[in-house]
Image: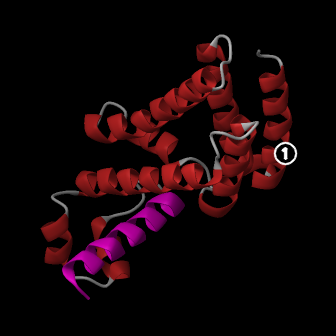
């Protein structure tokens, strides 16, 4: 296994374990054992557990945006609905157990500014995404629509743990249609 392959393995194992057990519930020994690497290999790539958490969050965010971008055609009649549908598929495939970014904000608030900043940055980026989309589509009051769409996706994510991704997505698509129709 090459050095970069080992780093990728560490990131994959760490993300899975953090997602399943929380950031505080997983130690570096468990990650090292499940990734089947030497302790020094981990420290050659990551200076600390917090640094590993930062990299896991950055990688997950890149995957989310790549996923969303590949499913949303900005020139379509309703990119807002496409974004909600794509977010719902992401939840079903990648985020069935809650929001890793929200968990990071809760676990690291007041303890690690960088981790908290990365996680909050993801949320701000979603808000900005919808604001830019509203501007491109000539929607009035793009800030309100962006806040409403972001809140809708956040609620969809939260409801996934209660009613499942498919049902939560169905409700959110219906709500998104209403929001988009009520703005000119």
Colouring rule applied to residues: secondary structure
Q: Up-down: is 43 above or below 39?
A: above
Residue at 59% across, 26% down: 136
Q: Residue furthest top?
A: 141
Residue 68 or residue 53, whichever sits in front: 68
Q: Residue furthest front?
A: 75
Q: Main secondary structure of the magenta part?
A: helix
Residue annotated with mark 1: 170
Q: Residue furthest bottom?
A: 1
Q: Is residue 51 visible?
A: yes
* Magenta stretch in the rendered image: 1-21
Report whether 166 appears left or right of 70: right
Question: Is residue 12 in the magenta section?
Answer: yes
Q: Position of residue 43 (x, y in %)?
A: 15, 67
Residue at 47% across, 55% down: 22
Q: Is residue 112 visible?
A: no
Q: Position of residue 77 (x, y in %)?
A: 76, 36
Report whether 129 appears left or right of 166: left
Residue at 67% across, 28% down: 149
Residue 41 or residue 4, whichever sits in front: 4
The quadrant in which the N terminus is found is bottom left
Question: Is residue 22 in the magenta section?
Answer: no
Q: Residues within 10 Å of mark 1 (few under 14, many from 20)?
A: some
Residue 116 placement: quadrant:
top left
Q: Secondary structure at mark 1?
A: helix
Q: Up-down: is 147 above or below 75?
A: above
The quadrant in which the C terminus is found is top right
Q: Position of residue 150 (x, y in %)?
A: 62, 30
């Amino acid at each position: 296994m090459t050095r970069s392959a080992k780093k990728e393995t560490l990131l994959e194992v760490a993300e899975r374990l953090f997602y399943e057990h929380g950031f505080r519930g997983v130690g570096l020994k468990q990650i090292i054992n499940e990734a089947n690497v030497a302790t020094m290999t981990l420290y050659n790539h990551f200076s600390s557990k917090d640094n590993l958490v930062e990299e896991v969050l950055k990688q997950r965010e890149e995957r989310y945006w790549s996923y969303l971008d590949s499913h949303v055609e900005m020139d379509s009649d309703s990119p807002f609905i496409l974004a909600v549908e794509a977010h719902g598929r992401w939840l079903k495939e990648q985020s069935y157990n809650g929001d890793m970014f929200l968990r990071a904000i809760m676990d690291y608030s007041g303890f690690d500014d960088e981790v908290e900043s990365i996680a909050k940055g993801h949320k701000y980026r979603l808000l900005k995404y919808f604001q830019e989309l509203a501007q491109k589509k000539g929607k009035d009051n793009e800030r309100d629509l962006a806040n409403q769409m972001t809140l809708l996706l956040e609620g969809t994510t939260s409801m996934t743990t209660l009613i499942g991704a498919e049902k939560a997505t169905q409700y959110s698509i219906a709500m998104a249609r209403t929001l988009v129709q009520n703005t000119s």
